[in-house]
Image: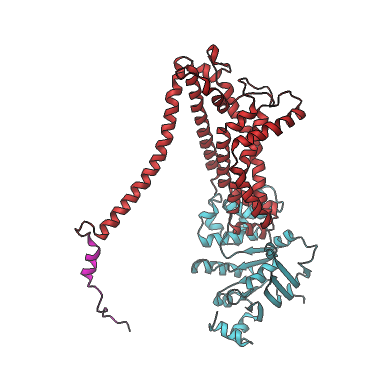
Amino acid sequence: MIDMNPPSDSKAPSELGQSFAKVSGAKFDRKMRLRWSNKLFRIVCIGSALFVCLVLLCILVLMLRTGILTFSNVSLAEFFFSTNWDPENEHYGALTFILGTLALTSLTMLISIPISVVVAVFLAEMTPPWLRNLLRPVLDLLVGIPSVVYGFLGLTLLIPWLRTISGHDLADGLLAASIVLTIMVLPTISRISDDAISAVPNKYRDAAYALGANRFQTVIRVVLPAAKNGIMYAVILGMARAIGETMAVVMVIGNTAQLPNSLFTPTAVLTSNIVMQISSVEFDSTWNYGLYMMGFILLAISLLMIVAVRMLQKKGGRNS
Amino acid sequence: MQPFIDINKLNLYYGEYHALKDVSIEIPERAITAFIGPSGCGKSTLLRTLNRMNDRIPGTRIEGKVAIGGTDIYHDEVHVESLRQKIGMVFQQPNPFPKSIYDNVAFGPKQHGVRGKKKLDEIVEQSLRSAVLWDEVKDDLKRPALSLSGGQQQRLCIARALAVEPDILLMDEATSALDPISTFKIEELTHELKNRYTIVMVTHNMQQAARVSQQTVFFLNGEVVEYAPTQRLFANPADSRTQDYISGRFG
């Protein structure tokens, strides 16, 4: 038998309705405060997001505003399609540097992605716990090493070694730079991929093993596809670092404004050329504007590459 | 006659922990055997011993003998991948791969070397039909498996397990995460499947064991208290602890 009489302290229905019907007139009423704090929180969040976008926009405008002045003295065609960079004689062809940056980044990614993914799989899937707990902090430390140190290593160890095996007098060039960059981005890509692989739920591995797959099949067919997004993210971060890296590249690429005819020929990329020349140009010269323009192109290339990777990822990820 | 699965004096340790104690049971062919008992009593552990999934847990140690079809599956020369191909498993949580429905079912056959689109199409259709899922998904096999409902996902997992043509199907509380209607569908499905497969299921649900199984094994603290034909075990248990458990006095 249910007691139909409400307990004596309960509210009458009309009283209950009143309690949430509307905010009372008082200025610092609790309901008013809650409403305002909610609004304020919203505004702060939106504001922060807008601020980040604004900063990016400001950087783009700043680089472009000065860079665009280049084209009052130099034709678009010359700047983008000529390889003759000789500012003292009024030649401003930046193609060498643009191609150099693209080639260096691609070569670096070509070498570093396979190695990093293998390292990540090894770390996440095969290493015994004690070794994993040793290797992860070591890789994290490697991420933080200043790039100039990597440059020194390239200069004193890598280049002499490359000279012996290639037979060139100067082994500075794309290969040396991309090996140094690979060593630099390897810890980044492999640690983030390692996290992505470790985050793949064990239930997928169980399912694969229970179907009679061995470890290799499980990793290739199940774990890596499931970790694809995280690995892509790692690749983007690594690539962004490779495109923009300056110090380590300057030290091993040779800094000569010429199209290389081999991987061992000294050449230059956007970053190395900017940093080598910016300190010696006049403030109002076309040379200076040209360097700004190159900075803008660098920015555009990195944004485009990131967008491209994102698009690829969407296209491939339909089923996940 | 030799029993299909013969477990003899099996002891299993996770490191120091003694998880299964002197387990000896026989499981008949083409019938459903249910493992019941309170949580942590070792029933899932025993199930995972049958397809050697416990090998994946470091520190597991086994004594005694598990023979399937007369072969000791813990013998050094047993090829674990082939063993698992012959013993399908369905888990507690539906765990389809984040791939399409088709790719989920075709996964096993592809791993075992089946090639050719026509052959694979055939296997996928047959497996989905066996799992009574075909009519619900046949229009778009390229759909992501994760867009299916929980009950459909679990039937997809059954189809995926059937696609590698196993002889035994292990179900580890396969319906405990599902709603009553999906549970009913899967129970119905097991009725069909037992004519072709030997099914071993772990269940928390005693009514389920009573409804679907032909033989029931009752576990307590890593030991087999009693096993018998299901009707007899529920109607007339030999051990007072079984009586207490099935009448709901504990667990």
Residue at x 78% of width, y 69% of height: B72
Q: Which residue in the rendered view is the most extreme toward the top?
A: A89
Residue at x 44% of width, y 18% of height: A284
Q: Is residue A19 left or right of residue A67?
A: left
Between A87 and A318, the one lying in front of the other is A87
Residue at x 32% of width, y 50% of height: A40
Q: How is the image coloured?
A: by chain
Give the quadrant of the C terminus of chain B: bottom right
Residue B24, percent across and down?
A: 72, 78
Is residue B197 at all visible to an observer of this figure? no
Between A131 and B134, the one lying in front of the other is A131
Residue at x 73% of width, y 74% of height: B10
Is residue B69 at all visible to an observer of this figure? yes
Residue B119, percent across and down?
A: 67, 51
Between A190 and A146, the one lying in front of the other is A146
Q: Which chain is cyan?
A: B
Relative to residue B244, is residue B103 depicted above or below?
A: above
Q: Which residue in the rendered view is the most extreme toward the right?
A: B77
Relative to residue A39, is residue B78 depicted above or below?
A: below
Residue B196, percent across and down?
A: 67, 67
Q: Is residue A9 left or right of residue A154?
A: left
Q: Is residue A168 left or right of residue B240?
A: right
The boundaries of the magenta stretch are A1-22
Would you identify the image quadrant in which residue B164 lies? bottom right
Residue B36, percent across and down?
A: 60, 76
Relative to residue A251, is residue B174 depicted above or below?
A: below
Question: Tag count in the figure?
Answer: 0
Between A43 and A203, the one lying in front of the other is A43
**Chain A, chosen colour in render:** red
Give the quadrant of the N terminus of chain B: bottom right
Would you identify the image quadrant in which residue B215 lies? bottom right
Magenta highlight on residue A5: yes
